[in-house]
Image (cartoon, grey):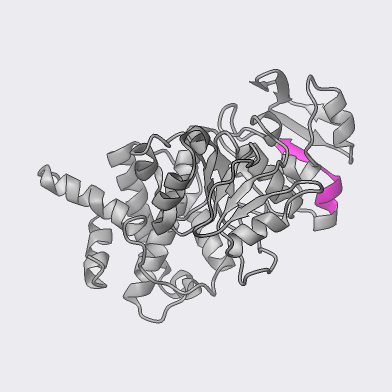
Amino acid sequence: PFKAHPRTLRTGVLRIPRRISCRRPFSMLAHAAACSRPIAVDSSAVRRGTRGISDGTLSRQTAAGRASATTLHSSSPSSVVTTMAAGVEVDVAAIIVGGGRVGQALAGMAGPGVADVILRRGDVFPASAPPGPIYVCTRNDALQGVVDSVPVARREDLVFLQNGMLQPWLDARALGDNTQALIYFAVAKLGEKPTDGITDNNPEGLTAANGKWAGALAARLASGGMTCHVLDRDTFTGSMYEKLIWICAFMAVGTAHPGSTVGDVERTHGDEVVALIEELMAGSTSARGVTFEAGTVTRLMAYARAVAHFPTAVKELEWRNGFFHAISAEAKAAGELDPFPKHTAILEQVGAV
């Protein structure tokens, strides 16, 4: 039923072909039975282990077709880890901190028999809490309070879903290896079904996760019809910077042109935002050694088209543009050139710094 590429990717006890292209629909249960351990993931969840496919072998099927036909890929032997090989790869009962749009959306995607516990502001961490992931669905400025409320022994289960650069903050609290996710889906209103960040360049989706509970999150999102890629640490780091660059560049350029939406920036100020994206990428590589996958600018411009109605504003400076501004300040203090001169200039222009 499938054709395997001779080179394979070994992950734990499960040997996954580097490229498996299914020629016809097949049962994941039957496939799981042939493996050394059971797999409780549907075909769409496995697809969500792929990233950045451009060789044309991933068919752009309808939603119904994607539910029945599967294509597994790895863009490199080490960069992509499918949900079958990422630790816990099934949806499990979780604690969800935050009852807002994202928290309610995650709770609504729980599979049959999965009973989550939702904690809101001021709630005490339950003694009988399920032993699974703790999805943190709050604003960034509430993170310290959330961490403080969780018993030390359970803090490794915290899963951070926030926008912005969290890594330095997490590292300072011995949480640097915790699960993080780059969320590209949006929930317009409380209780509404989320809209996935599917773009004309990446029909396989852009949401990604890394860490202990990444596979469980991918399975949860798959049950809600959302995409999620489980990435290794290095690839995830590049994707984390990529998403940060998108929000910093588009918000800054949009703010510099008052009243602009994300779509206005992409259509009318495309050259300006591309130049800023390229500067932030180059500076991130030189100052922090970040490696980006090919096609970053194309991906980010395509995502802008997918969320063209979003407003623009420079906000949450500490977690977003402030991260790059701090690197600029560090370089200047050392007598070096600013790695992000355009970024610094635009922040000064809009009065953000």
Drawn side of residue 339 relative to residue 225, left or right: left
* Left or right, 322 with reference to 68: left
Q: Which residues are magenta?
A: 65-72
The percent coordinates of residue 149 (x first, y second) are 46, 47
Percent from the top left, x then y, of residue 272? 36, 66
Q: Quadrant of the N terminus?
A: top right
Judge by depth and name the residue closer to the eye, 277 or 347.
347
| Residue under the point 35% across and 73% down | 255
Q: Nearer the viewer, residue 347 or 145?
A: 145
- In the image: residue 258, left or right of residue 226: left
163 is higher (above) or lower (below) than 237: below
**Residue 184 can be seen, yes or no:** yes
Q: Residue at x 34, y 41 (%)?
A: 285
Q: Nearer the viewer, residue 323 or 276?
A: 323
Q: Residue at x 87, y 33 (%)?
A: 29
Rendered image quadrant of residue 271 = bottom left
